Amino acid sequence: MRNLVFRLVSAIPVLILVSVMVFSLLHLLPGDPATAILGNEASPEAIAALNEKLGMNKPIIVQYGDWVYNLFHGNLGNSMVDNTPVTKLIAQRLPATLELTVGAFVVAIIIALPSGILSAARPGTWIDHVCTFISMLGMSIPHFWLGMMMILFFAVKLGLLPASGYVSLTQDPVANMEAMIMPMIATGFRQSAVLMRMVRSSMLDVMNADYIRTAVAKGLSERAVLVGQALRNAMIPVVTTSGLLIASLLGGLVITETIFSIPGFGKLMIDSVFRRDFTTVQGSILIVAVFVIIVNIIVDVLYTFIDPRIKLDKEDK
Amino acid sequence: MENNRTRRQSVMRMICARFIRDRQAMVGAVLVCILVLTALSASVIAPFDPIFGQNYDMVLQNPGTGSYMLGTDELGRDTFSRLVYGSRFTLAAAVIPVAFAMIIGIPIGVYAGYKGGFMDQWVIMRVVDAFQAFPSLILALALAAVLGGGFTNAMIAIGIGFLPNFIRITRSQVMSVRNLDYIQASKSVGCSDLSIAVFHILPNILPILLVQMTLSMASAVIAEAGLSYMGIGASPEQPSWGSMLRISQGYLSVQPWMAVWPGISISAIVLGFNLFGDGLRRAIDSKVRH
Amino acid sequence: MIRKTQFIIFFMVLLCLLVSGCGSQKTSQNEWDGTLKISLRADPPRLDPCYSAAVVDRFVFQGLFDKLVDLDSTGKIVPMLAESWDISSDGLVYTLHLRHDVKFHDGTDFNADAVVFNINEGRKKESNRKSELTFVNDVKALNDDTVQITLKKPFSPFMSVLTDRAGMIRSPEAVKKYGVDFARHPVGTGPFVFVDRLKGDSITLEKNPNYWGKGDKAPKAQRIIYKIIEDPNIALVNLKSGQIDFADYLPFNQIESYKTDPVFTVSDEPTLGFSGFYLNIKKDTFADTRVRKAIELLIDRDAIVKVALSGVATPGRTAYAPMSFAWTDFDKPHKPDIAQARQLLQEAGKDQGLSFSICTDTNPINGTLVQMLQKMMRDGGIDMQIEKYDFGTLLAKGKKGSFDALMVSWSGRIDPDQNIYTWLYSDSSNNYCKYNNPEFDQILDEARVSLDMDKRKALYSQASEILDRDIPYVFLYHAHNLYGMRRDVKGYVPSPDGMVKPVSMYKSTD
């Protein structure tokens, strides 16, 4: 309990730091929003006027103060490009990223769970070696290259799937799946690598634990033991790792979304950085940070609550 | 004192022996060596000039055309030669960010882990948290742009992104050894904190840090490829595998082989670092567990 | 048991329906549903002609807004919202006679007051049209259908300016109502009405039932959907599969395969623009004209167009593209002359160790081009480094003058003045290289004031010759647009300004 309070309180300086970091990084970038937004076809007066309007001429501290003040009133500001409220922009772009995240995670589970359990059940055998090697590949193959190869094979050569053209889930589920299946697999494969190792090692640990040995000695069939005790207990660190993986995906899908042209949150962030749309970047990063912090706190709390023994393996990342 | 040193030496020897016996680890080591050797002897191995060997009559050729083993790119340059020279960038991408992160991160981590207190809890760890809450690509990209663009700055930007991890790991390792008997003994004898850190703590945590180093090198290579893919990093003529990948996407329908070779190379080298690091970790872990 | 099988059958039937459902979606293309899907290579930042700065905005404007005057396919200025116009003999007073049967999408009347309102808005400090309207002294409505614009000085590009955003008339009611948010509720008089927009994804327009254009000039499509597709490869795939009907950007390097494609055709259209790079005259390296000329002599423009642009461009060495009235044969570049270049360098004392860096953006075509330049420079004994920046940074460097050479291009306008003045006139806003030549300035000033086309053409030729001598900017080529459209898309008429005008377009399988 005291730990939870500490974590919550310590989140405050972190958020302050994040806000300062994102703010200063953006303002250190060469160029200014008006020039980036208006381009080289704009007159210097228009640029100066836009900069003035965006508040770029005020001292940095004042700009920061204004932004934070608005934050406390629940206002993330408006996009510098076209004045859309940042919250609305993010809300528009989140569904695609969330869908990708969930889909990739499902793919990761489908790959990692069976292979992890299998490897743990038969450690040292060729199954174990193959599964471990595949997970190594998952960690080593750049997921964007995998995406490119999938596009090459399935879209260019075979013409089976579209190379892109995101259609929202509500609009046309089939077309949506056609567009999303490749990025989901490309991202999911990479995620499955870490997950698989986690499953394997935590299952091995649990299976070597005394209470499992007792169960086996008592004569329960191996399968019953596996499914019953080991799996349930092994899943705990897996759940926590999954939580962290999902958190990392929120900001980590930038390249995937770029390759497959998915109008998601990651792409919004990167485009906004290039366009010097400060408010959108600031708002987005803050949301990501809050999300990551919350997930971390939940994961940490879960850790300490559920099984103190698991703490030993926490450093396995 | 002497006892510790000889004990450490025999432990090192044991770790090395375990490592060599581990097949997967050795595969990783071989791959890494291939990278280093290729990078060092690029000018000898590569048959063509990777930047100026442009031949506008031989653009986008398939592998095996003439003496172009792996084909040519959009300017008629030999892909194999570019790949070979690109290994230098890969090596730099593995080394520069990690060296940067280690040189700065390890001392900070040691300080945080050993001293603890306000500085550790409320300053260092909070800064680490803040960095890790940032989406890593965006951070690297913005940093690279702020630093002025180009390959080296991109590598430093990636290195800055690795700092939190090194600080964290160093710190937790230090925390687990700082209560060991002989550290306490040294302290009571009057050794300065600095000498304890350098002569006693560091050698103990070095193995884990080495594992983290190799694994980070794997991540760094992928990070460089990712940044290059987004257009940040090496300038267009430099044959970094990441930018070769980026350019190849525009020619996917015209000459798909351009995308295949850099990707395979990156995957192979990253696999190498991962196998190496994993093998190292296994060699060390077994010492801890059994 | 029975329930389980029933469930499975039910599920299979559902699956079949689903699959056939999407299958039939594709085959029902035989009957056109009135929707035309056009791809856009970027998400228009601001759908407000007064504040717009991006080329893609202009694409969407073609459907939403009418202009005072328009360009026909030969580049001639033709009536649109203005039925006719008179220009006073001293070139200072423009009297526009407007159509009187036009209403805005919000039902309000289009009249002279609306035009006055728009032009005055355009002249405001924050407006992006300010520089185009800078010579306007006064604008007033003589009556409901007549507008009189008085200029401070004669300005011959003025009518051309009115064929673009400065001449697009927005509903004053809507502007007053929405203010800054007008871009999210654009209201004009055009053949299509704004319906909806999903940022980063699409913009939907619907047919304007009250459009003043009748018969041939009436909009044929029921709906236009602009889909944002940034990657030309993806646009290509979507074009092939029918998810879009018209692609605004296709990868150049596959052009050979397009020519024989059964499903779509391409339109390779020259634009009015130019592409190349500035040489920073303030730097010692480039202070000597001979050095700059030598650099230009080393460049093989034909090779560049062939290799980097797959032939989809016209090599050129002036600011004027073939479709501009100021174009002459002089634009055709000469072959590179390495010997001459080396000699010039020697005379200037820079034949050893000359080195400079060129700044470029992340566009892959520019990346290829700049590598070719690097090799060409090397053949002349010059060491050129390449620096790559994102576009925002690149522009910032340009404006600050912190570069040696900087790649920058211009999409081009119909009037030659608009292709040269802000770029190379002393102290002009886009004159990043700080070229300062009084003789050149004088020619430009004279040309923009004269209404005599032949005289202007001669003056611009002179200007081109001076630039070819001084090389403050190395002109490389005039870009082309490569549009693709499915074979059942009809009614597309290429426009010299590269705009795709959806009003005449429709789909038909005959």
Image (spheres, grey):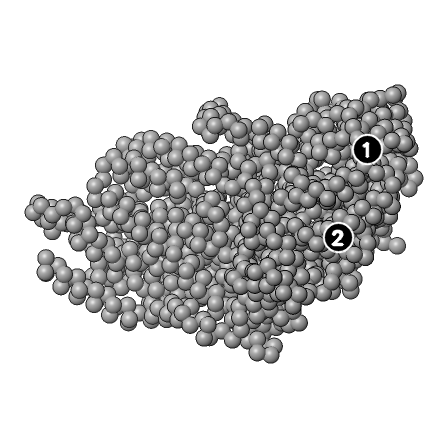
Amino acid on which disc 1 is placed: Pro
Instruction: Pick out the residue farthest to the left.
Output: B189
Instruction: Residue A148 in the image: state x and y as whole percent.
Output: 57, 59
Is residue B29 in view from this perspective?
yes
Picture residue at 65% right of the left edge, 39% below the top:
C427
Q: Which mark is residue C154?
A: 1
Please determine whether, in this image, residue C438 is positioned above or below residue C8: above
User: Disc 1 on helix, strand or loop?
Assistant: loop
Q: Quadrant of residue C435?
A: top right
Please determine whether, in this image, residue B67 is positioned above or below residue C161: below
As rendered, which of A194 and A235 lies closer to the eye?
A194
Disc 2 to disc 1, how far (Cα)?
25 Å
Q: Are marks 2 and 1 on the same chain?
A: yes
Picture residue at 64% right of the left edge, 52% below the top:
C277
Of all chains, the one bearing label 2 is C
Left or right of C300, for residue A140: left
